[in-house]
Image: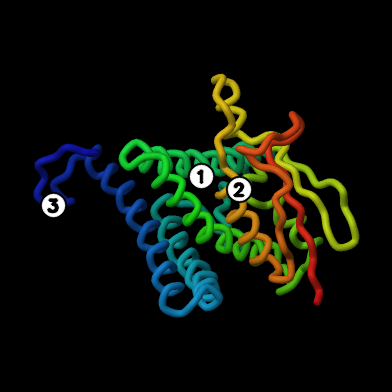
Amino acid sequence: MIQTDAESPDTLDQKGRAGLILDFFHRTIVHHALWYAEVKHQMGEKKGLQMLEKAAAKSYQIQIHHLSKVFGFEMVDNIPEPLLSMEVEQQKELLHRVAKNWLVGDGVWFQTVEFSEGMNDAKRCNDSCWSQFSPVEAASIKNFLGMEERPGLAGLKRALAFRLYGSINEQSISDEQEKSFVFQMNKCRVQAARNRKGLDDYPCKSAGQVEYTYFARAIDERITTECIGCPPDRHPPEWHCAWKFSLNEE
């Protein structure tokens, strides 16, 4: 928080103005999310996701153009040139850090509610948040990869690799059948951190059931999700949670 007695942005010092710029970014992100939430509420999830895709694409083009003028970077195929010219390992590290920041933000929100209102309310808000976020992430991945409307299990396998979690956790696919496969979260950053501290696994099963069910269904509504095991369930050392995805073509 910037402490200042300025009467307007024009009378801020450089530190205050820099802080206000960052706060403007924060407000813009929240406003963008609230627009989607309200359109979804008024018109339903399918229409909301369609509107989100269109609005996000147009808004990005306008906003990144404005920023390119201020920072003096070129745009190449609608991507800032500095991102394209980064060394491969640096680019991979940035991708990892952005995904890690998302997880940090998720954890901060959970603890903010937990420390204020208790674990029960934090878990309730967390599970509800996943019911909102999983379809958005699925739709974003489908759009990024140019997937067809019903890409089946093959599409789900690809999509799982492109989740934010896919860039920070270790995961694998096993027991592949014609109409099903098993997905394992072999190393979860959240659970691994707790284990290093000598704590029990966080009981994330209720959130996982929402998270994976809604994600898979948003990739292809024919896909059903079954929990094989997720904390507080007992599990083998090689995975923290495991899920079976099946394609129902009837």
Q: Position of residue 108 (x, y in %)?
A: 42, 39
Relative height, residue 45 to residue 90 (above, below): below
Residue type highlighted by circle 1: Trp
Q: Which mark is residue 8?
A: 3
Report if the CB atoms under discs 1 and 3 are less than 8 Å apart.
no
Relative height, residue 140 to residue 243 (above, below): below
Relative height, residue 125 to residue 229 (above, below): below
Check disc 3 and report its element: helix, strand or loop.
Answer: loop
Q: Position of residue 144 (x, y in %)?
A: 65, 62
Q: Which residue is mark 2?
A: 164
Q: Which residue is mark 1?
A: 102
Tell me the distance, in whole angstroms, between the alpha carbons under discs 2 and 3: 39 Å
Q: How is the image coloured?
A: rainbow
Q: Residue extending furthest right? A: 178
Q: Quadrant of residue 19?
A: top left
Relative to the observer, which residue lies in front, 178 or 39?
A: 178
Tell me the distance, in whole angstroms, between the alpha carbons under discs 2 and 1: 8 Å
Q: Earlier in the sequence, mark 2 or mark 1?
A: 1
Point 11% across, 45% down: residue = 6
Residue 61 vs residue 188: left or right?
A: left
Q: Earlier in the sequence, mark 1 or mark 3?
A: 3
